[in-house]
Image: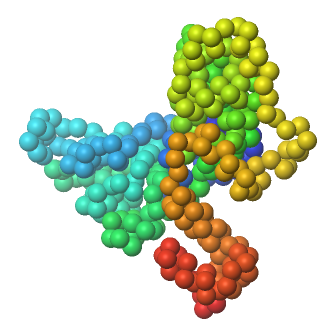
């Protein structure tokens, strides 16, 4: 099994098993998850495990202007448009016998979606300005952080294309869902920085606990930023919970007194680890008291949106647990059935079945 996906908690273990399972097939994969959760890493893991001889070719559909994206993907013939002075191979051809990774596919323009759908169905492409079909053998991996179903309802994404790319969907866990991986992730990132010749800090147990308590809206990408920040501000120093909260999550450079060895030794002894708490009790279900520390770690919160997001996720989870039964979901959520129906209408959550 590939070592690209770091971590050993239950959620990460499940992700690794799914990757190993799908890698040996040639099925199209749709990676779904929040921004920064590591969709590109999972795509690389699938490609490496597949044993394909070709390359993994990455395309960020949101980063390339829409007028250039077609040529970037499918290539073009000489004279196809102004400035096309020579024939050019596109990303599809470059990924032949390998893997094409289309990141942020939810941002692909509608006019290109039809051409992508045809390429998937026929396993062949036509260059811009070309007439001949070019047969290809590749694995397609798509990724998005967006609600594609909502975009379909809004007329911004083709339903037939969604069903073509949603052959094997993989939900990538957020960093908050894999908090126990944080020490391993941090140490791996520090080793990478050290290999580049830079001095690195040492995170003590209280520092790791502070990192686990943080909500990580930017997921692994944000954690990497924090670790790089730590290497810049605190090279060779020991980092405590206080340093994490005051100097890393909020960028505040310590003054000269704080840099003295005596103070560093004092702060390194500060520990917020609760030894009376078992591992199974930690980070199970968020408790309202957890929000007491919010403004130690964050500057602000969109309270209405945050509470709506929580409601949406719990309603979807309750419906899934009860096989779509509204009555059963209402019982699980301890609310009236009519109240649940109103909330489902509010969030545009479809009702399945007659219950």
Would you say 118 lies left or right of 175 here? left
Q: Position of residue 71 (x, y in %)?
A: 24, 45
Would you say 116 lies left or right of 111 here? right
Residue visible at 44% across and 63% down? 148
Residue visible at 39% across and 69% down? 152
Position of 332 relative to 162 (above/below): below
Q: Position of residue 14 (x, y in %)?
A: 71, 51
Q: Position of residue 161 (x, y in %)?
A: 39, 65
Q: Quadrant of residue 41?
A: top right
For the N terminus, the quadrant is top right
Which of 226/181 is in front?
226
Residue visible at 29% across and 57% down? 109
Q: Quadrant of residue 213?
A: top right
Q: Position of residue 127 (x, y in %)?
A: 23, 48
State the residue lying farthest toward the front. 257
Which of 124/277 is in front?
277
Q: Can residue 157 be seen in this snapshot?
A: yes
Residue visible at 45% across and 68% down? 149
Position of 265 relative to 309 (above/below): above
Q: Can residue 164 be seen in this snapshot?
A: no
Which of 242/34 is in front?
242
State the residue lying farthest toward the bottom. 354
Position of 108 relative to 149 (above/below): above
């Amino acid at each position: 099994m590939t070592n690209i996906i770091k971590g050993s908690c239950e959620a990460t273990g499940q992700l690794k098993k799914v990757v190993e399972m799908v890698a040996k097939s040639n099925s199209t994969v749709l990676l779904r998850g929040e921004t920064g959760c590591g969709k590109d890493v999972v795509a690389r893991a699938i490609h490496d495990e597949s044993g394909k001889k070709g390359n993994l070719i990455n395309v960020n559909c949101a980063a390339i202007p829409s007028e250039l994206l077609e040529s970037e993907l499918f290539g073009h013939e000489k004279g196809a448009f102004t400035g096309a002075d020579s024939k050019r191979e596109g990303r599809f051809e470059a990924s032949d016998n390998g893997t094409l990774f289309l990141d942020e596919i939810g941002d692909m323009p509608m006019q290109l979606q039809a051409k992508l759908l045809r390429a998937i169905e026929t396993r062949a492409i036509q260059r811009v300005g070309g007439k001949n079909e070019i047969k290809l053998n590749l694995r397609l991996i798509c990724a998005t952080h967006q609600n594609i179903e909502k975009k379909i309802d809004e007329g911004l994404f083709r339903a037939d294309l969604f069903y073509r790319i949603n052959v094997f969907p993989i939900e990538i866990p957020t960093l908050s869902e894999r908090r126990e991986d944080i020490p391993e992730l941090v140490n791996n990132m520090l080793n990478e920085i050290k290999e580049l010749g830079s001095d690195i800090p040492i995170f003590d147990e209280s520092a790791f606990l502070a990192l686990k308590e943080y909500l990580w809206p930017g997921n692994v990408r944000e954690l990497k930023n924090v670790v790089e920040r730590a290497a810049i501000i605190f090279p060779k120093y020991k980092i405590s919970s206080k340093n994490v909260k005051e100097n890393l999550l909020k960028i505040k450079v310590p003054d000269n007194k704080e840099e003295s060895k005596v103070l560093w030794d004092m702060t390194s002894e500060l520990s917020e680890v609760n030894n009376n708490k078992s591992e199974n009790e930690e980070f199970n279900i968020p408790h309202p008291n957890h929000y007491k520390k919010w403004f130690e770690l964050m500057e602000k919160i969109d309270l209405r949106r945050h509470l709506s997001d929580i409601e949406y996720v719990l309603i979807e989870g309750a419906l899934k647990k009860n096989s779509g039964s509204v009555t059963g979901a209402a019982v699980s959520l301890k609310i009236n059935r009519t109240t649940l129906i109103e909330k489902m209408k509010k969030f545009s959550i479809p009702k399945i079945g007659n219950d």
